[in-house]
Amino acid sequence: MTEEIKKAIETAEQEFQKEKESEQIKAVKEIVQKTLEKIDEIDKEIKELEEEKRILRLDIDDMKSGKLNLIAERQKKDDRARNTSIVIIKEKEVIRNYPYWTRPYEIMWQSDDSWGNNVTYCQNTTSTTLSNGMTINCSVVKDNAIGAYMVHNKIVNLR
């Protein structure tokens, strides 16, 4: 009888060990699954951020070229571009017999930050002063977009 008891105890211990290992395996599988899901979420976020970065780079390039019309056109066609850009630019009135760089544009700040949430109208060489004293002049967008900017304690040169 003692021999049978020893075998029963051994069998019970083996079954307990197998259950424990099975639980550990399930836990490892769950950890790996959750990790892969998190990686997938991050990849999606990166893709979205890269698209936003591309739109902002296009905005900068168009400003350096003095082409507010391209930004306005992009924002009109693409809601994502409209929501990503720092400012919303719309052609104030359509005057097709003038070159694009002399057309008036309405500029609205996208968020309420240090610039404030203002509306500015630009036309030829006239400009409206923002509430914090800054002015925007459409005739000099091209020349003034380039330069050195301090961004989060590092200098960014736009050429």
Image (cartoon, rainbow, N blue to C red):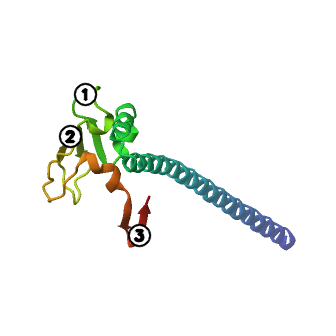
Camera-side residue of 126 and 114: 126
Mark 3 vs mark 2: in front: 2
Q: Which residue is mark 1?
A: 95
The residue wearing badge 2 is 123
Helix, strand or loop at mark 3: strand
Query: The residue under label 3 is which amino acid type?
Result: Ile
User: Residue sitting at 56 percent across and 51 percent down?
Assistant: 43
Q: Residues within 10 Å of mark 3 (few under 14, many from 20)?
A: few
Residue on which the image places disc 3: 155
Say whether residue 110 is visible: no
Which residue is the extreme one toward the right? Answer: 3
Percent x, y of residue 111: 26, 51
Q: At 62% from the left edge and 56% from the top edge, which residue is drawn?
A: 30
- 147 or 14: nearer the eye? 147
Callout 2 touching callout 1 (CB < 8 Å): no
Q: Which amino acid type is marked by label 1? A: Ile
Would residue 7 be found to the left or right of residue 45 on screen? right
Q: Which mark is residue 5?
A: none
Percent position of residue 88, x then y: 29, 42
Please say if 54 is above or below 11.
above
Disc 2 on helix, strand or loop?
loop
The residue depicted at 22 percent of the width and 30 percent of the height is 93
Rendering coords of residue 15 (x, y %): 75, 62
Q: Work out how far the residue at label 3 is from the one at label 1, CA to CA, in angstroms.
A: 39 Å
Please tell me which of labels 2 and 1 falls first in the chain.
1
Q: Is 111 in front, or is 100? A: 100
For the residues bearing labels 3 and 2, Cβ distance under 8 angstroms: no
